[in-house]
Image (spheres, helix red, strand yellow):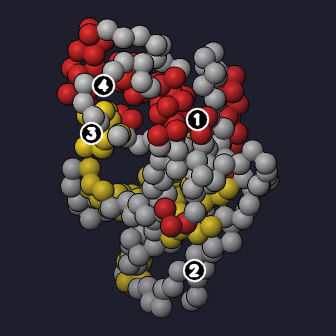
Amino acid sequence: MIKCSYWGGPVTVQNTVNVGQPRGGFEVAITGSNGYVTTQLNTPSGYQDGVAYGANAMNAPYDAQGYNTFMGSKLFTQGTWDTSLCSQYCESQTTYNLKTAPKDGTPAKVCKFFNTYILTALKADGSVVTQGQYCSLYTEAWPIRYATNGGSWYYGKDQYVVNYSFGFAKTANSSDINPLDGDVKGAVYQAVADIKWSSLQPFCSTYLGYNTATATATTLPYDLAKYPATVISSACSMQATPASSSSTLNSFATSTTATAASTTVV
């Protein structure tokens, strides 16, 4: 007998564990078993066709301006594989972000791209347990070369792997930002938040020339090392005011001793 079975998710070597069973005194054996996984997915309305990443998830760095484009992720555990789960999550998160945008001018994160894949646990006891469909959201559409997360991380002795991974970018429009160019406004306000969090206003005063530096080079704090100089200058100008005092310089020296990176700004 030839039997065909249909599944709402991908068939992998790990989940092909049915080797047959005894029935009525006979052993039912399975032979010639083959699995076929489609790469033709339904494209959600308002999106470009998906790009297949195979067994890798997106591992996006900061963009060219130092901005963190990641918006969050969610694991769906009910129903079959469905790209619209991610597109709906993308839309709802954007709506929420716009409604709750900060009052200080920080731009709300708007979803422009998502990566979806099946997360599977390879248990220490040899069992294979599908965890669900994962959706990760981003403000910028990253190219396939950044899909480098093979997933083989461990929790205890259990191994978690990525399968059936795809990236979907929204239909192109004038508001899109290429991550290789970067989001300048987003990066500036993100840098402002970093300056506030790490109390780097004294560094900014010296960086902008409001205070006389005590050395020929000003050490760049670790929290700001991911930004280009133009972003640092813009962010610092929003946090520092012209002033000059020995107490301010002493505070700066103490701050940079604790947080300085190896990068220097001359």
Q: Is residue 7 visible?
A: no
Q: Earlier in the sequence, mark 2 or mark 3?
A: 2
Identified by mark 1, the residue type is: Gly
**Residue at image point 63% right, 29% down:** 107
Give the left or right position of residue 183, taking residue 260 as reference.
right
User: Which of 94/16 is in front?
Assistant: 94
Q: Which residue lies under the disc numbered 3?
A: 261
User: Which of 210/220 is in front?
Assistant: 210
Give the left or right position of residue 176, taking residue 180 as reference.
right
Q: Earlier in the sequence, mark 4 or mark 2?
A: 2
Identified by mark 4, the residue type is: Ala
**Residue at image point 71% right, 48% down:** 176
Identified by mark 2, the residue type is: Tyr
Quarter of the figure that contains the N terminus? bottom right
Identified by mark 3, the residue type is: Ala
Q: Which residue lies under the disc numbered 2?
A: 36
Q: Which residue lies under the disc numbered 4?
A: 213
